[in-house]
Each structure stands twice: as structure tokens, then as C-alpha cells.
Image: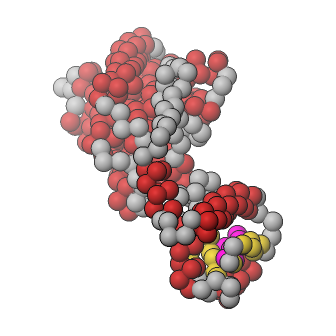
Amino acid sequence: MISVFLLQWQRFRRAPAMILSFLVMTVVFVALLSGNDPAERPPILAYADDSLGEAAAEEWLASLNETEEFEFQLMREKQVREAVSAGDAPLGLRLMDGDYRILLAADDVSRFALEAFLNRKYQQEMRLGQVEQQVPGSDIRTQAAAAMKEPALQVVTSTLDGKEEFQYDNRLQMLFGMTLFFSVYTIMFSLVKIVEEKKQGTWNRLILSPVGKLAIYLGHLAYSFAIGYFQIVLIFVLFKYIFRFDVGDRFGAILLIAACYTFAIVALGLLVTSLLSRPPQLKAVIPIMATGMAMIGGAFWPIELVNNGMLLAISKVLPITYGLDALKGVALYNRSWPELSEPISFLLLFGVVCIGIGISLMERRTY
């Protein structure tokens, strides 16, 4: 087993281009697609006109930044106008005494959300100001803030089916989806060597050697697992510690789930290899299969957005669906181990079944 395992690494050292290309493509796709997050807005550049003093402008800015809907940054008027004119900022904000103006170089759909937010905020401030004028000396703002912290009524929301609310993080969706997607290519293409060896007669010569048939299989499977798992772990480490993606505090659980997913894909690759007898067939089927699994399993977009019953039924038998569910369960929902047991158990069971069927079919096939 060890000799076969090391032989595969020697082959990789002589021709690493294909495996490294999948690694590079994963990094490029995640970096490009995760940067286009509609939920993340750039800060709104704001300036105060002459009707508003510096202290009042700072108070307004602090009030506007109390919520997480928008982030406002106070700058000089010239800087704001230059940034908007140059296209560095989609819009700007002019703070006035009791009013505001939005600066636009071109029409931007985000201005509607900003305008609604500012209208709500200014109306709230106007009401508080009117109460302060009617009741001089009252600390109405402190009282209102205290009342908001301890409201008279509390509303608890829950879904009708009892499931947890869907959370979406574009960066994690792209990181997990693209990583699991490209790892399918790496793992399955590494198993093509088995068919090539059987086709060329190298397999028969190995069987006649002191190395047992089971050891030969294990050597190939161990190499495919190692190269696929190494790629996944390297991507996760790179984006967690270099690009500062927030994957949660349970990185060990993420690595364990990645190992279970890698095992399932290795087993699936062996099953596919046992069904096809020629390397060109495998090289044609693998991209179709990998892309189809990624699309149906939720690698390109969240599976929660899919409403088609047939597609959802197909996704229930794909390992990538359960791999993504477990990874997002750790990073987004902080699920406990009992809650993660279902996707992990499926991946392990799927792997065992596919390996058993794959080896059985491969031994019966003539090349």
C-alpha cells in the first residue's frame, strides 16, 4: 500500500499542472465571486454644510451609525464631491440642520434604501425634538433609549415548519461551494490512473508482485484522499488566516467535515471509475458530473433558494449537499454535534457503500 501510495506522489511530482490548476482556480473563483456581496455596502461618505456645526455633525453621524443598515463616514465637502464625481463612491450625503441631500453622479438603486432610512431617522429625531420643546428639562432621549432596551412587549418569531431561519453569507457560500466543487475534479481525475493502469496492463504486473490487490486499491484511494483533502484544507486555511474570512471558532469541526466529504467523493470517484472502461470516457463524464452535482447540491447558490421538488429530491442523494449543509451548520448556525450527525453519517455511509460497489464492479469488468 505504501509503495503504491508513494508511486502516485512521484507521478504527481512529474506532472503537477492539472492538480495545481484546480487549486489556483478555486482561489481565483472564491476571491472574485465572494467580493461581489450585495449584503456588504461601502461606507456612505457624508459632510456637514454651514448650517450644522462640527459638534452637531458628529452627533448626527453617531446617531446614523447606531444601526447596522448603513455605515456613514464624515469627511470634508471637497473630498466627498470628488469621490462621487470620480465614481469612487456611488453616492454622498450632505447633512443639514433638520434636513439632508443625497449626492449622485449617476442613478443608483441603493439610494432608495438610503432615502427610506434617512427619512425614518430624521422623523424620529424631529419627534424627539418636539417633545423636548414641549417638556423643557426632560431627558426624553435617555428615557426613550431605556424603554427600547426593556420594551413593554416582546415579539418572538418562528417559522411554521419549525426550521431555523435561513441565513446567507455570500463569502462563505462561495468559499465552501467552490472549494467542494473543484475538489471533485482533483479527486476524480486522480483516480483515472486506475483505469489507465488496467488498460495498459500495469495493473496485472502489480498483482503479480508481492503487493496484494487490496493494498493496491488502498494505495490509490489513500493518495486521492490525501491530495483532495490537502487542497480543501489549504483553501480553508488560506481564506481564514490570510483573507480573514469569518468561518467561526470551530475550525477543527470544519476540517473533520471536510475529511468526511473527501472520503465520500473518493468513494464516488471509484464507483464512477468502475462503470467506465476507458480514460477518455472518464475525462468527459467527470466535468459534467461535477458541475451537475454543484448546481443541484447548492454549491453555486444556496439550496434554500430552490423550490423545484424534483431537484430537491435529487440533491438528497448527493454528497456535496450534505457537505455544504454541515459546513454552513458549523460556520453560520453553530450547530451541535448531534445536529451535525445526520450529514456526517450520510457522507460516511455513502462512502462505504460506493467503495464496496465500486471495487466489486471493477473486479468483474474486463479492460
Q: Is residue 32 visible?
A: no
Left or right of 225 on screen, residue 85: right
Residue 68: x and y, percent? Answer: 53, 57
Residue 228 screen position, x and y as percent: 38, 41
Q: Which residue is located at x 62 percent, y 65 percent? A: 134
Q: Is residue 79 above or below residue 337?
A: below
Q: Which residues are magenta?
A: 89-95
Q: Is residue 340 left or right of residue 303?
A: left
Is residue 76 left or right of 317 when viewed as pictured? right
- Comparing 83 with 95, the one in front is 95
Q: x, y (%) of residue 309? A: 64, 18
Q: Residue 312 occupies which quadrant of the picture?
A: top right
Magenta-drawn stretch, dominant element (helix, strand or loop): strand
* Coloration of the structure image: secondary structure
Residue nearest the viewer, comparing 232 with 210: 232
On screen, residue 24 versus residue 214, left or right, reads: right
In the rendered image, residue 91 lying in the magenta stretch gets the answer: yes
- From the top left corner, tell me how far across and down residue 26 is, in percent: 50, 51
Q: Quadrant of the N terminus?
A: top left
Query: Residue placed at 42% from the left, 46% from the top?
Result: 150
Tell me if residue 311 comes above or below residue 29 in the rendering. Answer: above
In the rendered image, is residue 271 in sight? yes
Does the magenta run of residues contain 351?
Answer: no
Q: Residue at x 50, y 56 (%)?
A: 144
The residue sitting at the right extreme is 107
Hey, which quadrant is residue 50 in on the image?
A: bottom right
Residue at 18 percent of width and 26 percent of height: 210
Instruction: Please state which of residues 94 and 358 is positioned toward the viewer in this rendering.
Output: 94
